[in-house]
Image (tube, rainbow, N blue to C red):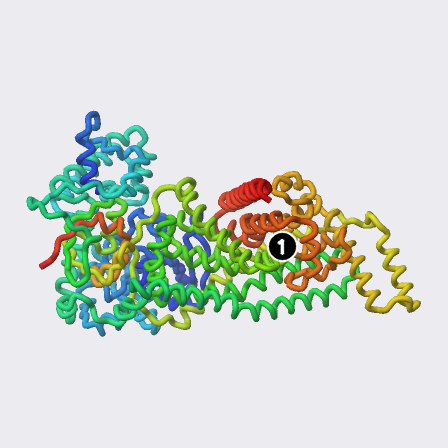
């Protein structure tokens, strides 16, 4: 999230790229809880970007990016959610948290968070 | 020979079996406390081994050493500030890659480290082959294989600890994060050195890495140390972050984490093999038992019904089963009270010992069976792995009111008794979630409030008493939902913990684990909450006893009793008549005593406050006495009504079911609107003094005062509106 969000903000007038707003403690929090800003498509294809929240059981996916703000990213990484990692969904409940198996461990992950993890389908 | 004292800290992921290892090492020689300033449990224990006195500190279970949660900061600070001689990282061998992530972070801290490869039997069974010797060589740390559930490997672990203490770190392993990141680390290190920033006990490289990772705790510390100079550092750090993000297409913390996993993968490449991995991957779903159980327990259709069933069973287990020992204890303490009461002749001292001390101790002890059963139930849910599923299943519902899935469990307990409900809130790791859950728990009508509802609903709405009581329960739940949202939006705004939770494999809880879990929590309750509850009951006794009425009764009751005695002995009235007349007079005396005491005076004094709610002074006094325990409202109303209405006997004390005459008296004195309003007030204002004592223990005095303040305000406002608006129509 930060990667995307900041690059957009940094274009704004008067904000030098070096300042990035970290001195404003409150902004960090807002960054963490705000929903993901529409990620800029990094692929040349026009296909909709998949997130972990879109994953369905029976298929396998690979994580390509995590955009949850630095605190959340660190947490997710520590649990094994890192780019390049392959996972599958285990009985997701509609609307509620998603159940994924990653690095051999099952995790329940909130939908809001799952939406911030970009994935691609693994063939 | 003098003993050598060393301290070791146990670190490890949640569900790695850390607690079992801790129990194996220290047995029952444990001490549970809190880390100063936070509600994170701190467990310590001692083990004597080969002339060493080894202090074992159980750090909270964490996935990493970032500043993500209170637990992680506590663990990190302990390692850095207290400098344990060795850190033992307990690792779930079935999940090496993820578990070693924490180990790598510990290695980055340059702390002497021993790895305990726990549950190695399970891993082997699953076809995982580990060359621990080679891995130990590669990582530069000693590795011990353990099977916590069978007590295997504890001695070897202690041997490894002592060996590490004596030899120090054998080989320093430095993790490289790749050229791009390393360049930026060098730049940050340069600016830190240039500015001569103190690095506390950390290495300067470590600080630089943490700044790149935007570790909130470290940023705060550096900011404080650097003062004005921080701007320069920030500039460098931010340009580094921008640089890495633009080149690597991911933020530094992700890149750094990736490098750590890369290091782990590299180390595992030669030392670790999985036989069944490919087969498991091909099928897409691992065919183990946990998966099968989960298909039922967390399914969209059966998940919630099963959860509710388990909650119902737990409630029955804690309160229905607990009722029996609680009853025996109550009778026991009553007997002791009578016994001692007979020995002591001085009225006041007898009252102090029997009513306040024995009553207070009894109050603490009689809660204990419920506590033991509750803690046991929670331990079973936790150790078996169901707790995480419960949170998962309920998260969708609870999320809507801004709470965590797990909040549901203490809230259910609250219908039985608020005291264990507050204690049960401990299962919530996030502080805000925990506090909000505690603050709304009071609206779950506890068992002690039921007699009040039974009495009032029976008095004013005899035909529909059941429905009326149900409506009160329902209003409580609605109020909890509303207040949860309000609190979440105001005082506990922001950072609701995002939901990521490991769903560990189901495990059979061990008897030893359950026992230790239950025992230590019960002991903590007795020790901490018990002393405060006791002090409270003495305070309440003082309020209800002083000033002593002495001979200041409005009538010469003693003379009246003597008269009746004369009549009885001369045979003019029967013994039955005598008994009923005397208890009538005694009830009047009790009422006057209460009205004369501080509590009664406070009630009288507060009457103007309660007037706009339609309450008179009796209700006001009863409300005050409800602070001692909500069921006291019934007996107080009984006592007070007996002053004016001689039909009401003090037999109304206690349950309230037989208090037919009290119901009549209430029906005469008050309108149904006031009666209903009083029930509402009883529902909404904070629970009893014991509960507040526990609240203070769990959340600090500030939160306790907030709880008291806001519930009183809410109760008053709601009752005010109901009475004022209701009066317009009725």
Q: What secondary structure is found at the residue carrying circle 1?
A: helix
The residue furthest left is: A44
Is the residue B112 above or below the residue B614 in the image? below
Residue shown at the point (76%, 58%) measured from the top left:
B647
Quadrant that contains the N terminus of chain B:
bottom left
Left or right: residue B498 compared with residue B56? left
Quarter location, residue A11: top left
Q: Is residue B505 visible?
A: yes
Left or right: residue B186 compared with residue B678? left
Q: Chain of mark 1?
A: B
The residue furthest top is: A14
Closer to the camera in the image, B147 or B385: B385
Count how many numbered circles sit on residues in the image.
1
Closer to the camera in the image, B108 or A19: A19
Percent across and percent down for residue B406 are 38, 57
Q: Is residue B163 visible?
A: no
Closer to the camera in the image, B504 or B450: B450
Residue that badge 1 annotates:
B460
Percent across and percent down for residue B218 are 30, 41
Residue shown at the point (26%, 52%) measured from the top left:
A111
């Amino acid at each position: 999230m930060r990667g995307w969000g900041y690059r957009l903000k940094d274009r704004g007038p008067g904000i030098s790229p070096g300042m990035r707003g970290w001195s404003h403690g409150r902004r960090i929090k807002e960054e963490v809880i705000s929903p993901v800003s529409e990620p800029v498509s990094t692929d040349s294809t026009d296909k909709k970007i998949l997130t972990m929240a879109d994953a369905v059981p029976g298929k396998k996916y690979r994580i390509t990016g995590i955009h949850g703000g630095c605190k959340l990213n660190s947490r997710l990484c520590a649990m094994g959610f890192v780019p390049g990692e392959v996972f599958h969904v285990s009985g997701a409940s509609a609307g509620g948290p998603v159940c994924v198996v990653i690095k051999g461990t099952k995790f329940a992950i909130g939908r809001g968070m799952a939406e911030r993890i970009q994935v691609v389908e693994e063939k | 020979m003098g003993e050598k004292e060393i301290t070791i800290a146990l670190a490890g992921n949640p569900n790695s079996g850390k607690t079992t290892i801790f129990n194996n090492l220290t047995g029952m020689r444990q001490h549970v406390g809190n880390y100063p300033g936070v509600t994170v449990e701190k467990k310590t224990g001692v083990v004597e081994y080969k002339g060493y006195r080894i202090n074992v500190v159980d750090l909270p279970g964490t996935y990493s050493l970032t500043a993500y949660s209170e637990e992680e900061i506590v663990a990190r600070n302990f390692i850095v500030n207290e400098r344990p001689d060795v850190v033992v990282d307990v690792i779930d061998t079935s999940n090496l890659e993820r578990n070693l992530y924490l180990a790598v972070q510990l290695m980055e801290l340059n702390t002497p480290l021993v790895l305990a490869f726990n549950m190695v039997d399970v891993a082997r069974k699953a076809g995982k082959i580990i060359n621990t010797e080679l891995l130990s060589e590669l990582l530069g740390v000693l590795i011990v294989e353990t099977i916590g559930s069978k007590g295997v490997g504890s001695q070897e672990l202690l041997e490894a600890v002592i060996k590490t203490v004596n030899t120090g770190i054998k080989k320093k392993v430095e993790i490289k994060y790749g050229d791009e990141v390393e360049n930026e680390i060098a730049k940050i290190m340069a600016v830190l050195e240039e500015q001569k920033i103190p690095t506390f006990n950390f290495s300067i490289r470590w600080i630089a890495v943490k700044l790149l990772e935007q570790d909130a705790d470290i940023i705060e510390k550096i900011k404080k140390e650097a003062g004005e100079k921080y701007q320069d550092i920030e500039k460098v750090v931010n340009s580094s972050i921008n640089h890495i993000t633009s080149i690597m297409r991911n933020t530094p913390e992700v890149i750094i984490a990736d490098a750590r996993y890369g290091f782990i993968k590299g180390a595992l490449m030669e030392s670790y093999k999985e036989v069944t991995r490919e087969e498991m991957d091909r099928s897409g779903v691992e065919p183990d038992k946990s998966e099968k159980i989960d298909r039922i327990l967390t399914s969209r259709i059966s998940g919630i019904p099963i959860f509710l069933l388990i909650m119902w069973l737990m409630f029955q287990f804690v309160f229905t089963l607990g009722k029996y020992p609680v009853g025996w204890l109550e009778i026991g303490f009553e007997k002791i009270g009578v016994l001692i009461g007979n020995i002591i002749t001085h009225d006041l001292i007898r009252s102090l010992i029997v009513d306040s001390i024995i009553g207070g101790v009894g109050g603490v002890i009689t809660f204990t069976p419920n506590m033991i059963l509750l803690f046991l139930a929670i331990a079973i849910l936790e150790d078996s792995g169901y707790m995480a599923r419960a949170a998962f299943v309920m998260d969708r519902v609870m999320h809507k009111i801004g709470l965590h899935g797990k909040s549901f469990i203490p809230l259910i307990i609250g219908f039985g008794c608020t005291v264990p409900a507050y204690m049960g809130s401990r299962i919530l790791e996030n502080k805000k979630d925990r506090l909000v859950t505690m603050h709304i728990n009071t609206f779950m009508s506890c068992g002690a409030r039921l007699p009040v509802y039974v009495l009032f609903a029976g008095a004013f709405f005899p035909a529909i008493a059941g429905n009326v009581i149900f409506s009160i329960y329902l209003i409580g739940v609605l109020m909890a939902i509303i207040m949860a949202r309000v609190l979440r939006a105001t005082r506990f705004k922001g950072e609701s913990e995002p939901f990521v939770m490991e769903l560990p494999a189901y495990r059979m809880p061990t008897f030893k684990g359950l026992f230790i879990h239950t025992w230590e929590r019960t002991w903590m309750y007795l020790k901490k909450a018990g002393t405060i509850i006791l002090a409270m009951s003495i305070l309440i006794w003082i309020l209800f006893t002083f000033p002593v009425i002495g001979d200041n009764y409005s009538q010469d009751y003693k003379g009246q009793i003597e008269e009746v005695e004369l009549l009885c002995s001369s045979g003019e009235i029967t013994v039955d008549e005598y008994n009923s007349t005397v208890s009538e007079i005694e009830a009047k005396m009790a009422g006057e005593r209460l009205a004369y005491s501080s509590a009664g005076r406070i009630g009288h004094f507060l009457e103007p406050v309660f007037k706009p709610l339609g309450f008179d002074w009796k209700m006001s006094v009863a409300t005050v006495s409800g602070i001692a325990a909500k069921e006291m409202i019934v007996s107080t109303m009984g006592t007070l009504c007996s002053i004016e209405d001689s039909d009401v006997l003090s037999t109304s004390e206690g349950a309230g079911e037989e208090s037919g005459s009290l119901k009549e008296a209430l029906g005469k004195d008050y309108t149904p609107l006031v009666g209903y309003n009083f029930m509402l007030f009883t529902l909404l204002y904070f629970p009893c003094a014991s509960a507040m004592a526990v609240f203070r223990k769990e959340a600090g005095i500030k939160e306790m005062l907030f709880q008291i303040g806001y519930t009183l305000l809410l109760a008053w406002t709601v009752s005010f509106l109901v009475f004022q608006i209701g009066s317009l129509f009725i």
